[in-house]
Structures are given as C-alpha cells and as structure tokens.
Amino acid sequence: MKAWLLLLAACGSSGHKPDAMIDAGPRCTATAAFGAPVPVAGLDSAFDDQGARLTADELTVVFARSRANGTNDLYMASRATTADPFGAPVLLGTVNSVNTELWPTLSPDTLLMLFDSDRATTKLHVFITKRTAADATFGPPAASVALADGDDQPMLANGAALYFTSSTRAGLGMGDIWRVDIDSTGATGTPAAVIGDVNSAGDEGAPAVTADERTIAFARNADIYLATRSSPADGFGTATAVPGLSDPAAHEAPTWISPDGCNLYLQSD
C-alpha cells in the first residue's frame, strides 16, 4: 500500500490548529494533544514517500521516494515558510545508487547526512555522506564502519547524538532503539540501548528525537508512541500511544519531531 507523509501539530486548549498557521508564533505546549494529521503539502506523489527528516526551522526536508521497480531514492525539498508547500523535490543524484536508499537524516548545519542503503549487502546499512557548504552537492557515501548490517533508520537528534534501530544487536525484542555519540565527520562511539520505557519485548523502531533528547517518538508494533525524560542522562518515562494513531489496520511510523515537540511528522499507509 502507498506510504504517505503526514504532519500532526500539537494544539492549545482552543482545539485543532490549521496547517496554514503552524508558522505563527508560539504553537503549543509540549503536553497538548496533537490535532488530526494532514498531508505534507508538496511531498504527495503517486509513489511511496517516506522517512521525511527536516531541519530545525522545518524549511528543508530530505526523504525517500519509491521508483517504479520498488527501490527508493533520496530527495531534498525546501520552502520559504512553514505555511508554504514544499517546492519540487530534487533528486540527490550523487548519493543514490541502483539499490535502495531510505531514512535520510541531516546534521544541524546540513553538511553531514546519514541514510540506509542495501547497496553493499542484502541488508540495510548506515551510510555517511558529507558536503562543504549548505548549497554544495554531497560527496560519495561511505559505509559506517562502527555500525553493522541491520542497524538502520538513523536519526540525528542533534550534532552529537545519533539514534537508530537494530534488529541484530542483543536487546529486549524484535527491534530495539539505540543511541551513539557522533561527531561532525560521522565518526561514532560505542552504541548503547536506550533506557526507560522505550524498548520492550515488542518491535520498536523509527526513533524521532527532539534536539534536547528529552522527547522521543517511536514506532512500537506499527503504532506511534511518545515518551519523555527530565534530562538526556535519565531513562525515558512511560511511553504512551499517540491518540488516533493506533489503528491496527494501518501502519504508522514517526519520521521527525520539531525541537519544541509541537509538530510531529509521520508516514502512514
């Protein structure tokens, strides 16, 4: 089934906020309920559009779009304000291959990008590509030597923290969420499983983490959950399902959450 890119905006006590107003002023309190999801304007096509990750100002997005043969390429798009639709997506030709590329994620300065690809083996692996300026093209990607086949769905919460999913590392369930330190070159430290009520005996994945690392959205058994903590040194508290996104007949996964926790982007079939 087709994958869609959607946006939920957290609302104040007055109710749902229209998509056209998400650029105006303080948008919410982080504990407010999310409104109904709406398609991300400009990123809706006849193909599968998924894995959208944005810059902090929500003006630039990288995402994956399927090809007719079922593989995926990475694209980038931009807009002038959050009230505008995204412009025509640009194919990241220096990054893509004849294989599948998924789940791109940008560093805050947009000079570093990580993504999944199965170009080297039959399993997804995290690849790293860099560029010298925000308007330059990305260089040839290289496989991360510190991460393994089966470590996928990379998400840069900020310039120093990389979250990812792993179904091959010893964890609590079918898939678990991990964190590792990362620097501006893409070099990483030793990964550790995220602690608190995130990983379980179920299947967790698709981490989307605020820049302060205090709020995480993630998929658990195809539904979207949220959890928070007081500081990055603490374990996450009780994870709760996002209301309206627990339909057993649908498969949703978060892709990005704004630094203030008010806007949640997701993909859904």
Image (cartoon, rainbow, N blue to C red):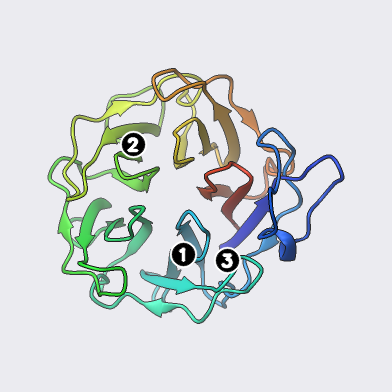
Q: From where the camera sits, is residue 122 visible?
A: no
Of callouts 2 and 1, the N-terminal one:
1
The location of residue 145, given as percent across then percent down, is 12, 45
| Location of mark 1 (residue) | 61
Three-letter code for the amino acid on which mark 3 is drawn? Lys
The location of residue 236, given as percent across then percent down, is 49, 22
Residue reaching furthest right?
14
* Residue neighbourhood size for the residue with mark 1, other residues' Cα within 10 Å, grouped as few (<14), some (14–19), many (≥20): many
| Residue pictured at 48% horizontal, 72% vertical | 78
| Location of mark 3 (residue) | 2
Residue reaching furthest front?
25
Residue 37, picture quadrant: bottom right
Of callouts 2 and 3, the N-terminal one:
3
Q: Are marks 1 and 3 in contact (CB under 8 Å)?
A: no
Q: Are marks 2 and 1 in contact (CB under 8 Å)?
A: no
- Secondary structure, mark 2, is loop
Q: Tell how many labels.
A: 3
* Residue neighbourhood size for the residue with mark 3, other residues' Cα within 10 Å, grouped as few (<14), some (14–19), many (≥20): few
Three-letter code for the amino acid on which mark 1 is drawn? Val
> Which one is in front in this view, the residue at disc 1 or the one at disc 3?
1
Mark sitting on residue 247: none
228 left or right of 14? left
Three-letter code for the amino acid on which mark 2 is drawn? Ser
Quadrant location of the C terminus? bottom right
Q: Are marks 2 and 3 in contact (CB under 8 Å)?
A: no
| Residue pictured at 48% horizontal, 53% vertical | 56
| Location of mark 2 (residue) | 167
Is 52 situated above or below 196?
Answer: below
